[in-house]
Amino acid sequence: MLDARICKRLGKDGSAVVIDVHIQAEDGITVLFGHSGAGKTSILRAVAGIQIPDEGRITLGETVFFDSASGVNMPMRRRGVGFVFQNHLLFPHLTAEQNVLYGARGDTRESARERVCDLFALMGIEKTVGRRPHELSGGEQQRVALARALATNPAIMLMDEPLSSVDAATRTRLTDEIAYIQQQTGIPFLYVTHNYEEALRLGKTMILIEEGKVTRLGAPAEIFR
């Protein structure tokens, strides 16, 4: 289980936002829901190790990622966290297969290729193997980005509004696929969105974030009702 107490001041005095949250994420998909600027992405970045909290404690199971009291700040590369960004961040000069192989670079060559083959089959994107990102649709780019993150064998998956740049029909398909992939892998997902339908379709638990604070916690349907 992810257990994160995060306190972080963002911005200058006049426009400062103070993130002050205690969140937990267990099995399934936990949705961080709220308006843009509420602090959702900053929470993900703190869990991943991209952003350092001013104070707090972040643990995943028995592993301590961050503890301001004892001076622990585990480097991002050692946290075992998969991160799918809003704008995919695929390497433009690499093929889809090479992008995903980059995620599996800690494996042996043979096991990496086997894992990548399995991931492409899981995503249903076998035909994209030799294409570069500019030759892929938005939905295909997102699937490749997710496959690359999964190739790292993460202990938890962080997803920052991954479907914001695709059309409504593609979003519906990808939402179902993300739910399926989470069920197949068993990896806990922490998923950021401000899209009502995504939260309802994906969230086992939803955490409502407003102005850097947790204001509601529960099943998405109950909170929206």
Image (spheres, rainbow, N blue to C red):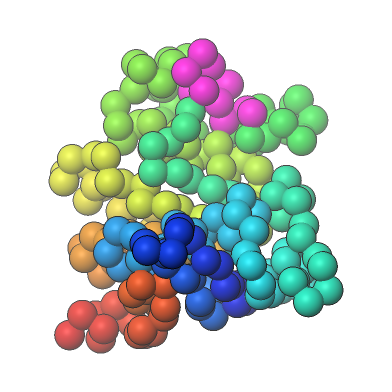
> Is any part of residue 183 visible from this angle?
no
Asked whether residue 183 is drawn in magenta, I would say no
The magenta segment is 91-102
Residue 156 drawn at (x, y percent): 59, 59
- Name the image quarter holding residue 124: top left
Outermost residue on the front side: it is 14
- Name the image quarter holding residue 45: bottom right
Q: Residue at x 21, y 80 (%)?
A: 224
Quadrant of the image for the N terminus? Answer: bottom right
Q: How many marks?
A: 0
> Is any part of residue 101 visible from this angle?
yes
Q: Is residue 61 above or below residue 150?
A: below
Outermost residue on the right side: it is 70
Q: Residue at x 82, y 67 (%)?
A: 71
Quadrant of the image for the C terminus? Answer: bottom left
Q: Residue at x 80, y 65 (%)?
A: 72
Residue 84 drawn at (x, y percent): 48, 45
The residue closer to the viewer here, 146 or 179, is: 146
Q: Residue at x 45, y 58 (%)?
A: 11
Q: Is residue 110 above or below residue 107?
A: above
Q: Is residue 211 above or below residue 108?
A: below
Residue 150 drawn at (x, y percent): 57, 45
Residue 39 drawn at (x, y percent): 41, 64
